[in-house]
Image (cartoon, rainbow, N blue to C red):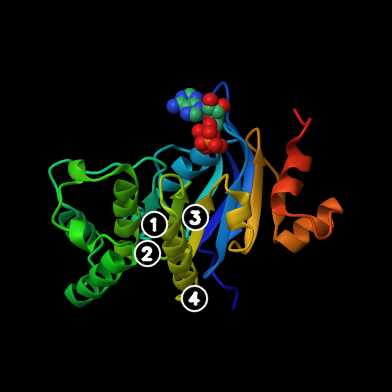
């Protein structure tokens, strides 16, 4: 039997006005246990693609399925299968770090035992234990970003959508995040990650989608992209530069 994709995007076109689509006929999938890197220049359409997946924007054309469900057909199953880490932290001012974790656990119906285990692990991993009772307004920028990441991991869904997570994290935080993402993959969940730090994600993502002006110009594993572009042994960053340089 064919395996159901965690995320399947077919012929997605969309944007902020019907007259001027930003995304053009985007097609790609994410399989269980895969980490996909969504890369592209500023304005290429990475966040807009994520907004469509999250259901914050409606496709002008095409379809998006999460675990086989279309959002409009089975909204609850669709939404509860996704956790999102936005580029800029969005926290509740009047809630502590622990209360954010509790709130997320309730929203995703995480069992009490799992909540305790995950909270314990995340507070240690991201070195946030001594801040667990601090209000979010009393945290540094990087700490606020860590809370967003911890909440997504608390939810424990099949699909994580993570928008440029490394900015603001210290080197230990980046390492913890990368290690934890590898653990998540091993447990069978999937990650769609956007980042400009190509040298960091090069060794972690199973496949890459290269977006340019709202179109997928190349996709595949690093080896496949090297073969497709005739650039054996070349780092991802250089391949990306060669691909987009001088292209309209
Ligand atoms: N709220 C908005 N209203 C209208 N146009 C928008 C809006 N947000 C983004 N755009 C446009 O959509 C296009 C894609 O932007 P998007 O934010 O998806 O890019 P991105 O790849 O995430 O870029 P970055 O790397 O800078 O985060 C750009 O041309 C941008 O100007």
Q: Residue at x 58, y 23 (%)?
A: 20
Q: Which residue is mark 4?
A: 186
Q: Residue at x 77, y 41 (%)?
A: 243
Rounded to the nearest angstrom, the CA distance separating label 1 from label 4 is: 17 Å
Q: Position of residue 122 (x, y in %)?
A: 30, 66
Q: Which residue is mark 2?
A: 157
Q: Is mark 1 within 8 Å of ligand 1?
A: no
Query: Disc 1 or 4, which lies upstream in sequence?
Result: 1
Q: Residue at x 76, y 56 (%)?
A: 225
Does residue 8 lie above or below 31 as drawn? above
- In terms of secondary structure, where does tag 4 sit? helix
Q: Position of residue 8 (x, y in %)?
A: 55, 56
Question: Does residue 240 appear to the left or right of 48 in the view shown?
Answer: right
Please say if the residues under marks 1 and 2 sit with CB atoms less than 8 Å apart.
yes
Residue sitting nearer the eye, 234 or 112: 234
Q: Residue at x 29, y 64 (%)?
A: 154
Residue sitting nearer the eye, 86 or 144: 144
Q: Which residue is mark 3?
A: 65
Please say if the residues under marks 1 and 4 sit with CB atoms less than 8 Å apart.
no
Rounded to the nearest angstrom, the CA distance separating label 3 from label 4 is: 23 Å
Q: Position of residue 110 (x, y in %)?
A: 24, 68
Rounded to the nearest angstrom, the CA distance separating label 2 from label 4 is: 14 Å
Q: Which residue is mark 1?
A: 82
Query: Disc 1 or 2, which lies upstream in sequence?
Result: 1
């Amino acid at each position: 039997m064919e395996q159901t994709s965690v995320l399947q995007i077919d012929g997605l076109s969309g944007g902020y006005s019907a007259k001027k689509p930003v995304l053009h006929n985007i097609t790609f999938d994410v399989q269980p246990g895969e980490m996909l890197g969504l890369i592209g220049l500023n304005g290429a359409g990475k966040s807009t693609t994520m907004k469509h997946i999250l259901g914050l924007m409606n496709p002008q054309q095409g379809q998006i399925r999460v675990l086989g469900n279309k959002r409009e057909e089975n909204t609850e199953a669709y939404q509860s299968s996704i956790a999102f880490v936005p580029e800029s932290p969005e926290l509740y001012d009047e809630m502590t770090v622990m209360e954010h974790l509790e709130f997320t656990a309730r929203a995703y119906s995480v069992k009490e035992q799992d909540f305790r285990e995950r909270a314990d692990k995340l507070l240690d991993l991201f070195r946030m234990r001594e801040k667990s009772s601090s209000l979010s307004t009393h945290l540094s920028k990087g700490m606020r970003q860590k809370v967003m990441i911890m909440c997504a991991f608390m939810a424990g869904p099949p699909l994580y959508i993570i928008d440029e997570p490394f900015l603001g994290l210290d080197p230990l935080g980046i390492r913890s995040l990368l290690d934890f993402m590898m653990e998540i993959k091993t447990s069978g969940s999937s990650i769609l990650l956007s980042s400009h730090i190509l040298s960091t994600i090069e060794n972690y993502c199973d496949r890459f989608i290269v977006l340019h002006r709202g179109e997928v110009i190349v996709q595949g594993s690093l080896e496949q992209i090297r073969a497709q572009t005739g650039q054996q042994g070349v780092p991802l960053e250089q391949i990306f530069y060669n691909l987009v340089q001088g292209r309209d």
